[in-house]
Amino acid sequence: MESIQSTSSKKDGFIRAVRRPSSGEGGVALMIFALLLVGIVPAIGLAIDLAIVYIAQSKLSAAVDSAVLAAARGLSRGNDSTAQQSNAVTVAANYVAANFQTGFLGASGLTSTTSITTQSNSRTVTTNASVTMPLTFMRILGPSSRTVQATASATRKDVNVMLVLDRSGSLAASGSCNPMKAAAIAFVGQFAAARDNVGLLTFASGYRIDSPLTTNFLTGSPTMTSVINSINCTGATNSATALSQAYAALATLNQPTALNVILFFTDGQPTHITAENWIPASSSCSQKNKYVKGVIGTSANYPPSGTLGLLDWNSDPQPLSSDLKLISNSGCSYNSSIWNISNDVTTIKTTDIFGNNFANNYTSISYDGSGNVVINAQNMSNVATNATYAAAKTIQQGGMSPANNSLANVYIFSIGLGNAGYPANTSLLKDVSNDPSASYYNSTYAQGLYIAAPTTADLNPAFQRVASEVLRLSR
C-alpha cells in the first residue's frame, strides 16, 4: 500500500500541504523512460542513416544529370561517330567522378556506365551510376551498407546549320573581314562532323553557296576552313536574297526532326534586292520596254543619288574575289556610269524574284500609278529593308522557299557588327531573328536571338554565343 506522508506549514495565514512520492513511484518512471529509449534510439538512428542515404542519392543524381548534359555536348567533338561516342563516354565518367567524390559521407565503390543509342537525326546518352553508402545505426538490424543508384538521359539532336556571311566591301574598309572569318571558322568547329550538316553561303550584292550542307565540312575537300579563309570582302548587301537561299538549302535537305538553324551575320543595312526591273521604251538600252531580272539597290555611301547599276543576278558561280557584274545590255547609261540607272530603270515589281513582298509596310515605300515601286535612292533602301523582313517572316512561318519547298521551325540567329559607316539595323535584325525583344516578336514562331558585336573584338564571343545557344537547343 502506498504510504502518503504530508506536512503542513502556516505562513502568512496560509496552510500548505506537501505530498512526498514514495521511492517505488520513481522506479516506475525510470522503467518507462528505459522502455521509450528502446524505441526512440533506433528510430533516431534510422532517421540519421536514411538522411545520409538521401543526401547521397541527391548528390549522385545531380552528378549523372551533369554527366549526360556534358556527354551530349561531347558528341560534337571528333571527326566521326566512333570518336564522338568515345569522347562522350569519357566525358560522362569524368563528370560523375568530379561531382561525386570518393569518400563523400563514407561512400565507396563509385561506378558509372554510359551508353549511346542512335535514332533518326538524334542520339540519346544514358548514364547509370551507383555507390555504396555505409550504415551506422541500421547495421544493428542487419545491413551494414546500402547501394545508391541514379540514372539520367539526354538527347542531342543532329544540327543543320546554314552559315550566312556578309562579305560586303564595308568589312574590308573597317578591317573586319579577317576577324569575321576567324570567328566563323571557330563557330564551325563546334559541330559534330559525320552527323551535323553545316553549309556556307556568302553574300554581297549577290550571293553564292560556297559550301553546300554536308556532314564532312571538317574533312571534305576543300574543307570549310579553307573555303572561309578564301573569302574576299567586296560589294554591297543583298540580305533578302541570302536569307531566302539559305532557307531553300535547309528546306531541300528536309530533316524536320533535326534542329535547323540559320546564322545570319552582317555589318550593314540591306542595300540591294534581286528584282524584275522595268526598262521603259524611252531608255537608250538595246533591251527595253520589258522587265529584266537583275540586282538593283542603293547605298548612302555612293554619290550623287546613291542608286547603283543593274547587276547580273544569275552570274553564279561567282568567284569570291569579285562581286556580280553589270548586266550586259548595250546602250544603257548604267553601263558607262552606274550612277544613272534611273535613266534606264523606272520601276520594279512589289516582290523580288524569290517572292519576298516589299509592300509589307515595315518601312514606307512610294509607288507609281500602276502600283509598282518607283526607283529612287530612299525607295531602294526601304525596299531592301522590307524584302529582308519579308524573307525572314517566310522562314519563321515555314512558308514556301525559292526551291518550292518548305520547312517548319527554322531558328534564325543574327549577329550585327556595328563598326561600318552604314551599320547593322538592330531593330531589323531582332525582327529577322524573332528575338523576344523584337518589335514584331511572335511566340508561335521559333525564338531566335540577335547578338550585337560593336567591334571586331566582339565577333568571336558573338559567334560562340550562337554556337552555345544552338547546342543548348539541340539537347
Image (cartoon, helix red, strand yellow):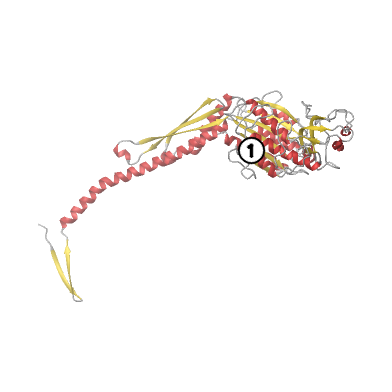
Report the side of 436 relative to 14 (left or right).
right
Q: x, y percentage for residue 20?
A: 17, 63
Along the line of sight, which residue is nearer the eye, 435 or 132?
435
* Local SS, label 1: helix
The quadrant of the rendering that contains the C terminus is top right
Please give the residue where the numbered disc 1 appears in the rendered image: 466
Q: x, y percentage for residue 317?
A: 77, 25
Of all residues, the one furthest to the bottom in this rendering is: 12
Along the line of sight, which residue is nearer the eye, 385 or 148?
385
Of all residues, the one furthest to the left in this rendering is: 1
Is there any visible trace of residue 101 in the rendered image? no
Q: Quadrant of residue 392?
A: top right
Q: Quadrant of residue 366?
A: top right
The quadrant of the rendering that contains the N terminus is bottom left
**Residue type for callout 1:** Val
- Residue in the picture at 25% in, 48% down: 36
Is there any visible trace of residue 28 in the rendered image? yes
How many marks on residues?
Answer: 1
Q: x, y percentage for residue 238?
A: 75, 35
Report the side of 51 relative to 41 (left or right).
right
Along the line of sight, which residue is nearer the eye, 44 or 397?
397
- Residue in the picture at 75% in, 38% down: 384
